[in-house]
Image (cartoon, rainbow, N blue to C red):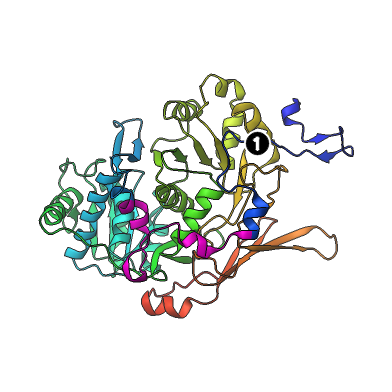
Amino acid sequence: MSAAFDLTTSTGSEPGARRTVERTPKRTPLIGDYEERRRTFTWNEARHWVDGLPGGCLNIAHEDVDRHADGGLADQVALRFLDRTHPTQELTYAKLRELTDAFAIALRTVGVSPGERVSTLLNRSPALYVTALGSIKNGSVYCPLFPAFGPEPVRERLALGSVRVLVTDPEAYQRKVAPIRDSLPDLEFVLIVDDRSETAAPATPVPEGMLSWSETMSAATSVLHRDGFTIAATRPQDPALLHFTSGTTGRPKGAVHVHEAVVAHHATTRFALDLRPGDIFWCTADPGWVTGTSYGIIGPLTCGATVVTDAADFDARRWYGILEQERVAVFYTAPTALRMLMRKGVDLAREHDLSALKHVVSVGEPLNPEAVFWGLEAFNMPVHDTWWQTETGAIMISNYPGMPIRPGSMDGRCPASRSRCWKEARTGEPTSSKAKSGSWPSPGSTASWRCDLAGRRCSGHISTTPAGMRRRLPMGGISPAT
């Protein structure tokens, strides 16, 4: 075993003691001194890091798009779409604003109201991101669906969410939606994305009873150029996002997140991911899951970064090529992906110029200690880890930049949060942890979550918002996760 993968050390410590990794970051971390930040940070401070709207209103899409399009980042690339079979596409913040305004107008034109649900069943493409942010601009609730779902998981989530609008492609519609359409009385509008580009003319006729994405966007853009657009004046506690749990242990549960969640997205993207304006950022999570929305769309765009997304399947050489060619500064991926890279060996990584890379971070299942040390050889930096879940909507515990890392554990609670660890009475071993914040801005006013460290199901409880959510967002069987 090489020294980089030797998880114990007998030098300067007891034999068999766990190694601690300390590396000077390539740039000064935005979180600064962690203990000082924990002592002084408040969520009220973080609320001043976003613009807000007149009258105390707040809209996630304004923080992601409009404030940059109105400022010095208008011509900066916001989203760059890579694909094996299509040319690379780019959307600047200015263009993203135009397209998301147009989609919001399209929703208003057909009578979709604030609070009503809009879903996507799409691969990573411009239409997905435009739908997500345009829905939020309209005051609607965006509900992403994982594109690999089969008909039954799609049906279950569309029904539970009382989804009124679905944006999908012809193949997904025919295979996954058409067979179940009659069982979805709330699903009134289906927009078919005729081509991967956001405005291309239809390549094939749109099925009867469907709407053409390109034709709908063209008409809405004409209205935008004629009449302009005003973003919905949503309140901080108005619902914005509906994420479903995986459903592997039973019926999937829906977790509602409000517009004020953007405060947590922004702060944790700065603190845990160390992302700043102009950075090239790549989150490999699919937007059909909470990570791909919270940190593949919302968080990095609030920071004024350029988000790279790749529609192709995993390929180690391709991934290293993207890191090199796109000059990625912050790479956020999953332990499974890191282990697949590890199996290809460090020599493949060393064939590529990864000097632009400043920070590598993991999300998902627990990060195995070997991957932390492997990062030292492959990326010349350790891999950091983050913990959170669908119910929290944003990172709650992390190995923050500049902190010593004990592989296999995380030491840094999100500033302004508290955590506790329970021990099993018979063995004294940790069994579960709880993270809590009295003013966590993601799901509601106060929330707490408990997660089983042994890998069993996490649970969440939102304590002050259920009545309000049900009043503003009638969703049948959906309630904040419990």
Res. 128 visible in picture: no
The mark total stands at 1
Instruction: Specify the quadrant of the image occupied by residue 402.
Output: top right
What's under tag 1, amino acid-wise?
Ala
Percent from the top left, x then y, of residue 200?
Answer: 18, 41
Percent from the top left, x then y, of residue 383?
Answer: 62, 38
Res. 21 visible in picture: yes
Magenta stretch holds residue 41: yes
Task: State the residue at coordinates (26%, 50%).
Answer: 97
The residue nearer to you, when weighing 40 against 289, is 40
Magenta stretch holds residue 132: no
SS of the residue under disc 1: helix
Percent from the top left, x then y, of residue 300?
Answer: 43, 47
The residue nearer to you, when weighing 424 against 60, is 60
Tell me which secondary structure the magenta stretch mostly adopts.
Answer: helix
Q: Name the residue under label 1.
A: 371
Q: Is residue 266 above or below residue 435?
A: above
Q: Can you say which quadrant of the picture contains the C terminus?
A: bottom right
Percent from the top left, x then y, of residue 412?
Answer: 66, 52
Query: Dot 1: few (<14), some (14–19), or many (≥20) neighbours within 10 Å?
Result: many
The residue nearer to you, when weighing 183 against 58, is 58
Instruction: Specify the quadrant of the image occupied by residue 156.
Output: bottom left
Task: State the residue at coordinates (48%, 55%).
Answer: 265
The residue nearer to you, when weighing 154 against 110, is 110
Q: Can you say which quadrant of the picture contains the N terminus?
A: top right
Magenta region: which residues? 40-67
